[in-house]
Amino acid sequence: MSHKPAEILADGLARMGIVLAHEAVDRLARYFQELKKWNSTYNLVGKAPDQDLIEKHFLDSLTLLPLMQEWGCPSPLLDIGTGAGFPGLVLKAALPELQVTLLEPRQKRVAFLKHIVRTLGLRGVTILAARLEPEGQLAYAAANQASTPTTLPPHPVITSRAFTRIAGATLAGLTQARSQPSSARPLSGPWPTSYARRQVSWRSGSRPSSAQEAVQSWESQWK
């Protein structure tokens, strides 16, 4: 028996003990429907059944919600290598008051991100078509980016699914002073260790000496 995206989302959130307003669940369901449409042409994410896509990308991203709420929803959040908006734009759809900066070098994904922002009527979203270099500089995908910044301002929280490629020193500069990997606490439900461990958030705290130390610290919390 097939289920509607909103039902899958609501069931997953209930299993994880996360409460969202109906309007937020509706936004996430619309987001998913648009992802499916675009995915048929642009292959933004791997093809899979609706249940798997929602669990792997949307519910996975939403495991960070308790952490964001515990921190008082600090803004702006920086999501490095966001792809189709995971986890940064999903968190924004769930928490409209959250300010986010999305960093993504691939133009098709950037076009999709802008489409979702328009479709959902979201405000407070900055999308940069660039990648982050090891020294903290921005390398833009398009040549004509004269009016855009070459470096990122400090952000109180950074998220990334590609965190193993980000140097600890770079993260330290982007979080104003020092950085510490933090995780959403293990939650009830079928996804906490299989999906959520693939992403990490940093905020001001004690700085890891390297990306590898950050990875080890993150993984040790799941042993």
Image (spheres, grey):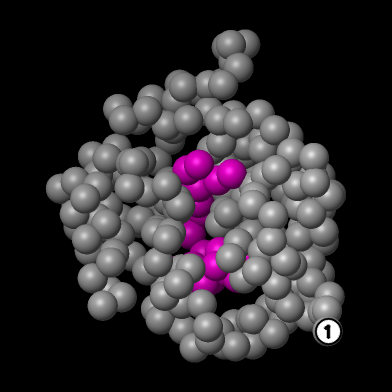
Amino acid type at mark 1: Met
Q: Nearer the viewer, residue 106 or 101?
A: 106
Side (left or right) of 96 relative to 31: left
Tell me the residue at 19%/46% (across/down): 210
Side (left or right) of 137 relative to 12: left
The number of callouts visible is 1
Q: Position of residue 35 (x, y in %)?
A: 76, 52
Q: Few, some or many C-alpha atoms within 10 Å of disc 1 (few <14, some 14-19, many ≥20)?
A: few
Whether the magenta-drawn stretch holds residue 117 is answered as no
Whether the magenta-drawn stretch holds residue 68 is answered as yes
The C terminus lies in which quarter of the figure? bottom left
Q: Picture quarter containing residue 114? A: top right
| Range drawn in magenta | 58-83
Tell me the residue at 37%/28% (across/down): 133
In this view, 60 is above or below 19: above
Q: Position of residue 74 (x, y in %)?
A: 48, 59
Residue 101 appears in view:
no
Q: Label 1: which residue? A: 1
Numbered disc 1: secondary structure = loop
Side (left or right) of 77 relative to 34: left
